[in-house]
Amino acid sequence: MTARSADRARYDRATAQLDAPVAIVDLEAFDANADDLLRRAGGKPVRVASKSVRCRALLERVLTRDGFAGLMSFTLNESLWLARSGFEDVLLAYPSADRAGYAELTADPKLAAAVTVMIDDPAQLDLVDAARDGGREVVRVCLELDTSLRLFGGRVRVGARRSPLHSPAQLADLARAVARRPGFRVVGIMAYEGHVAGVGDAVAGRPLRSRAVRLMQAAARRELAERRAEAVRAVRAVVPDLEFVNGGGTGSVQHTAAEDAVTEIAAGSGLYVPRLFDNYTSFRGRPAALFALPVVRRPGVGVVTVLGGGYPASGAPGADRLPVPYLPEGLRYDGQEGAGEVQTPLLGSPADDLLIGDKVWFRHAKAGELCERFDALHLVEGDVVTATVPTYRGEGHAFL
């Protein structure tokens, strides 16, 4: 029996009394992945990206481990909810236009002390001030540095379109603008190198593309390490008591941690290890989050149909954004149908061994987005479900 076959047998036994669709987290794999993130971080604290987990119980679980410190959230409303729930260090990773949220933040000392907001433009400060509604609390601010690699005089750009602040001078100018402004305090810098952390460099069957990605990423890491260090020096000249410099992501933990200028690493997807993280040479994780769909039809030889399945991930459309049939091994989509909203046909010889009511296990393409489809995660240890915990959705929240 292969390791994957053994996992399937465990998951089937653990969920034998649960009707599919059902989602699980294998706690042994989850904890092993957490250990690997810490190993690669080399002693620097790891801030957990909440959007990649979207389950308070699992956020609490990982933050009890030495080496993990703080959360990185994705909306202001989520940040306030997490802070009200007892999380004391929440970095909002994206600028917000939530006026009601800012009014609440600036009126509550506990929330203002726990939540740090992201900016890259003085106009975002104007929005906060306009929303204060009498709130006088000082707002903790993090400045975001654009990490994109610019080549050939800027004619070629590699990386996500995030902050407009690319140069150290631009970042320092914004730090000075905040310092002059009552009601705000710069406490951190963030620089997320998604073109390194979130792009696999070993794509199966694409050796030339994989080599090109590795060359690009090596160049990007060198350029960013130098520019990030210069940016940190420039901002520290304005804000000597800067609390943190955040960088990285699951795919670049060890590279970013090696930079002296970086004080903490961000990661979250590496806890669940969705399918998009199969294509990296720098680490190997264990799939921890899976979902099962029930077989409801057997249309013919080598074909079964499961209920549901159309759970695409965000990003540029493509086959790599679809969940992947994982257990039993050897199943694939019908190219004419793909993953369907209500039903999904699956092809392959393992289909002939599946009966009506059997479970087919899938891995989502990205991490936390799976939790937008399920109210609960069943936590598996060995071949037993030891707890069932709500996702954000299960607690009645869809933050974005």
Image (tube, grey):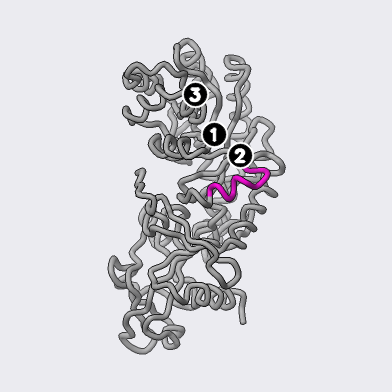
Viewer-proximal residue, 381 or 32? Answer: 381
- Rate crowding at label 3 as few (under 14), some (14 to 19) or many (20 or more) other CA atoms within 10 Å: some
- Rate crowding at label 1 as few (under 14), some (14 to 19) or many (20 or more) other CA atoms within 10 Å: some
Q: Residue at x 55, y 56 (%)?
A: 210
Q: In this view, does 154 lie above or below 372?
A: above
- Rate crowding at label 2 as few (under 14), some (14 to 19) or many (20 or more) other CA atoms within 10 Å: many
Q: Where is residue 350 in the image (x, y as percent from the top left)?
A: 46, 83
Q: Residue at x 45, y 36 (%)?
A: 84
Q: Is mark 1 on a helix, strand or loop?
A: loop
Quadrant in the picture for the C terminus: top left
Pointer 2 residue: 69
Q: Say if mark 2 contacts mark 3, CB within 8 Å.
A: no
First in sequence: mark 2 or mark 1?
Answer: 2
Amino acid type, residue under disc 3 in the picture: Arg
Task: Give the quadrant of residue 222.
Answer: top right
Residue 89 is tagged as 1
User: From the viewer's perspective, is 172 left or right of 236?
Assistant: left
Pointer 3 residue: 140
Q: Which residue is drawn at 38% across and 58% down?
A: 375
